[in-house]
Image (tube, helix red, strand yellow):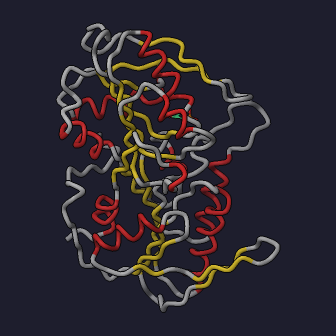
């Protein structure tokens, strides 16, 4: 729990802090940036963006930022490389325009799952991305639910690592989903996360699946599920899967299949980052899942939305974290 900054604030409450910081948004998730400035009671600034015929991008800051603290909101989500470059160019433009301090709100840090060499000969892509972010002059990063809690240590600048788990716990209580249910991590990497949310929910029982991923083609196999922490059977109980990212959806689908084979009744899914690549929305909608809850760290475009999906907002948490402590 101590690795995350947690807030129990209801998203519906207007936070409205007074801030002198200028908030800029890239194009990756302007909707989230709009919600953040609404909470802060300030206005949003958009850099001018021009794409040359050959695909090169030009970013220009039109506002005066000399000596100011500024914020840029831009997840490194799909299209990952375009959004990364846009973030770097925006920060460079702000620094050249005289900004004193640039905080990058990167709600979803793309490339975070490539945080080590899995097979010899591979690049550690995350380290390259971090070098790029630092080289352009970002002074501080604010991000959510990193794949590994070690990632902030790879940065040479401060990182505020926030978590949507509090928002999830709040929603689970509001909808009484915890009654007789068990929390499930779809892989062993998520066990720490599941223990944290279990504590938030009054030591709710939890378990984990042992997952294997083929490193060449990415195929997933849910090998087995451990006995729940309260040693009771999963049969006829509801399951709440908690994960950090849903990308192609394979991890969730394999977990659901295993849970169904164990006799679980209803399944709910909570995941922070709706990356939703390939046909993940269709897989999730068609699977025996009651509801899929995600956050707006990544923009879910209309074509990727589906009836079972509910998007919870992290804007209040970002606004609060950006507000200087009094
Ligand atoms: C993996 O360790 C992560 O926690 C997620 O479970 C995974 O990245 C999700 O990817 P996908 O939806 O493609 O299975």
Examine the rendered structure and indicate whether residue 241 appears above or below residue 82: above
Q: Where's residue 60, x and y in %?
A: 61, 84
Q: In this view of the protein, which residue sits in the foreground, 273 or 100? A: 273
Q: Where's residue 272, x and y in %?
A: 42, 44
In the displayed structure image, the side of residue 198 where residue 296 appears, left or right: right
Considering every residue shown, the one lying at the far right of the view is: 54
In the displayed structure image, the side of residue 132 where residue 18 appears, left or right: left
Q: Residue at x 32, y 17 (%)?
A: 265
Q: Residue at x 47, y 68 (%)?
A: 30
Q: In this view of the protein, which residue sits in the foreground, 238 or 100? A: 238
* Count of marks placed on residues: 0
Examine the rendered structure and indicate whether residue 303 appears above or below residue 176: below
Q: Where's residue 42, x and y in %?
A: 32, 80
Examine the rendered structure and indicate whether residue 271 appears above or below residue 7: above
The quadrant in which residue 173 appears is top left
Q: In this view of the protein, which residue sits in the foreground, 87 or 175? A: 175
Q: Residue at x 61, y 54 (%)?
A: 78
Q: Where's residue 28, x and y in %?
A: 54, 63
Q: Which corner quadrant holds the C terminus? A: bottom left
Quadrant field for ligand 1? top right
Q: Residue at x 30, y 34 (%)?
A: 196
Q: Which corner quadrant holds the N terminus? A: top left
In the displayed structure image, the side of residue 182 where residue 88 appears, left or right: right
Q: In this view of the protein, which residue sits in the foreground, 213 or 171? A: 171
């Amino acid at each position: 729990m101590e690795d995350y900054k947690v807030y129990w604030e209801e998203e519906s409450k207007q936070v409205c802090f007074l801030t002198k910081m200028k908030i800029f948004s890239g194009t990756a998730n302007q909707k989230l940036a709009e919600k953040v400035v609404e909470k802060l009671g300030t206005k949003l600034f958009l850099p001018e963006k021009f794409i040359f015929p050959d695909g090169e991008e030009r970013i220009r800051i039109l506002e005066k930022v000399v000596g100011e603290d500024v914020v840029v909101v831009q997840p490194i989500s799909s299209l990952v490389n375009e959004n990364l470059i846009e973030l770097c160019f925006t920060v460079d433009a702000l620094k050249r325009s005289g900004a004193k301090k640039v905080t990058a709100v990167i709600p979803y840090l793309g490339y975070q799952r490539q945080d080590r060499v899995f097979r010899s000969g591979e690049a550690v892509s995350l380290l390259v991305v971090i070098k790029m972010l630092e080289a352009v002059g970002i002074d501080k990063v604010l991000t959510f639910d990193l794949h590994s809690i070690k990632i902030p240590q790879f940065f040479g600048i401060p990182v505020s690592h926030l978590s949507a788990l509090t928002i999830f716990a709040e929603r689970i209580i509001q909808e009484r989903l915890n009654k007789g249910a068990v929390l499930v991590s779809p892989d062993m990497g998520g066990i720490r996360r599941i223990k944290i949310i279990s504590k938030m929910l009054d030591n709710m029982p939890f378990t984990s699946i042992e997952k294997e991923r083929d490193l060449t083609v990415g195929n997933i196999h849910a090998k087995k599920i451990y006995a729940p922490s309260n040693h009771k059977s999963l049969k006829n109980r509801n399951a709440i899967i908690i994960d950090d990212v849903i990308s192609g959806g394979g991890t969730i689908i394999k977990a659901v299949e295993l849970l169904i084979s164990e006799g679980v009744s209803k399944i709910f899914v909570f995941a922070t980052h709706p990356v939703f690549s390939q046909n993940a929305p269709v897989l999730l909608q068609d699977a025996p899942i009651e509801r899929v809850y995600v956050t707006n760290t990544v923009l879910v475009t209309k074509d990727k939305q589906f009836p079972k999906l509910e998007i919870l907002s992290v804007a209040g948490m970002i606004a609060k974290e950006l507000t200087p402590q009094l």
